[in-house]
Amino acid sequence: MIKCHCAEVYFDQILEEVRLSQRPVLEVAQTMGAAETCTACVKDMLQYIQDHLEEFTLVGNSAHQPSAF
């Protein structure tokens, strides 16, 4: 999965905003309308962000955090 299909937001758009704003991943995603409706994208989104950021901090809605993190 490369995007939130419900909101039609690509993970690279979220990644870019996280890099620019230094805001938490889930906060950015939800501001963009992603990761809220069905939440099926959350695990893939977090993995994508983690793979593309050197420093990765999960802050935000703990209900969306995969147990592996």
Image (cartoon, rainbow, N blue to C red):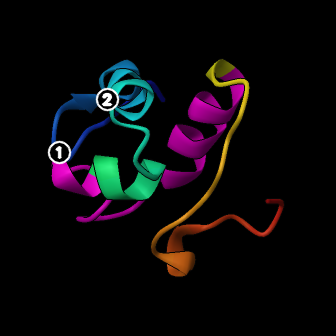
Displayed quadrant of residue 36:
bottom left
Q: Is residue 69 above or below residue 61?
A: above
Q: Which type of secondary structure does the marked residue at label 1 adopt?
A: loop
In magenta stretch: residue 23: no
- N-terminal of the pair, mark 2 or mark 1, is 2
Residue furthest to the right in view is: 68
Image side of residue 45 versus residue 55, left or right: left
Q: Which mark is residue 19?
A: none
Instruction: Out of 24 and 64, give the one closest to the viewer.
Output: 24
Label 2–label 1 contact, CB within 8 A: yes
| CA–CA distance in space, label 2 to label 1 | 10 Å
Identify the residue position indicated by label 2 in the image.
17
Residue 46 image position (x, y, % from top left): 58, 44
Image side of residue 3 versus residue 44, left or right: left
Q: Is residue 55 above or below residue 67?
A: above
Disc 1 marks a residue whose amino acid type is: Met
- Residue bounds of the magenta highlight: 30-51
Q: Which type of secondary structure does the marked residue at label 2 adopt?
A: helix
Identify the residue position indicated by label 1 in the image.
32
